[in-house]
């Protein structure tokens, strides 16, 4: 690998982690190299830097393009293809999460919905169908939350994530207040129907 120790350590780590994330080791290394490179790189430069075959680099670049994680660029008076990663880290994270959702979460949710639409369950299937319904509800809740978060502008998303435990404290405070409002509304509904609430003795 034709890299200085600092770059090499980062690239090797991404290659190791790539295999755990479900991508080829070389793909992880290619992405790490492009991420650290100040200038776009062509396939020959990537091959020389990583010490891997040209065919592996070509396949790796195609996979990264399919994930929308690298961008193709052309330089003046140069017919070769150059590649780079987005400068905005949040754009990279959003793209990665969105692609994983499309490839892993959406197909599962579709299958769960198909199973729920099948013929009425027999007694033997009740438990399994209830478990499937619970899983579908949870995934739909999470995907709805993801959709809401993904529509936020990056600055607002960062602010929201920065709130941390403050959000939990707000929820706990709300939970203490909401029941009081609920009882108040119930009392108002009773008054509107003309039914008097018995007085305590």
Image: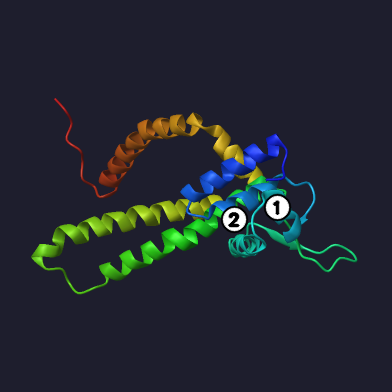
Residue that sits furthest to the right in the current view: 77
Quadrant placement of the N terminus: top right
In the image, residue 115 sits, relative to residue 150, either above or below, namely: below
The residue under the point 28% across, 40% down is 187
- Residue 26's label in the rendered image is none
The image quarter in which residue 131 lies: bottom left
Callout 2–callout 1 Cβ contact below 8 Å: yes
Residue 16: percent from left, percent from top: 53, 44
> Is the image coloured rainbow, by chain, by secondary structure, or in one colour?
rainbow
Quadrant location of the C terminus in the rendered image: top left
Q: Give me the residue at 39% from left, 31% from top.
A: 172
Q: Quadrant of residue 126?
A: bottom left
Q: Is residue 147 above or below residue 160?
A: below
- Label at residue 95: 2
Give the x, y percent position of residue 32.
Answer: 64, 47
Compared across the picture, whether 154 is left or right of 39 comes to left
Tag 1 residue:
86
């Amino acid at each position: 690998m034709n890299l200085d120790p600092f770059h090499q350590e980062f690239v090797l780590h991404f290659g190791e982690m790539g295999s755990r994330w479900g991508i080829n080791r070389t793909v992880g290394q290619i992405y790490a190299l492009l991420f650290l490179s100040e200038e776009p790189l062509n396939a020959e430069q990537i091959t020389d830097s990583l010490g891997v075959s040209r065919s592996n680099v070509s396949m790796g670049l195609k996979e990264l393009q399919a994930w929308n994680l690298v961008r193709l660029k052309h330089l003046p008076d140069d017919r070769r293809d150059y590649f780079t990663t987005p400068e905005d880290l949040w754009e990279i994270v959003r793209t990665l999460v969105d692609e994983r959702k499309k490839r892993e979460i959406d197909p599962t949710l579709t299958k769960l919905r198909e199973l729920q639409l099948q013929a009425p369950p027999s007694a033997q299937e009740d438990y399994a169908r209830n478990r499937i319904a619970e899983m579908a509800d949870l995934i739909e809740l999470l995907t709805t939350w993801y959709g809401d978060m993904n529509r936020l502008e990056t600055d607002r998303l960062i602010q929201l994530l920065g709130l941390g435990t403050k959000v939990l404290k707000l929820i706990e405070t709300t939970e203490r207040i909401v029941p009081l409002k609920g009882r108040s509304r119930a009392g108002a509904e009773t008054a509107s129907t003309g039914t008097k609430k018995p007085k305590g003795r």
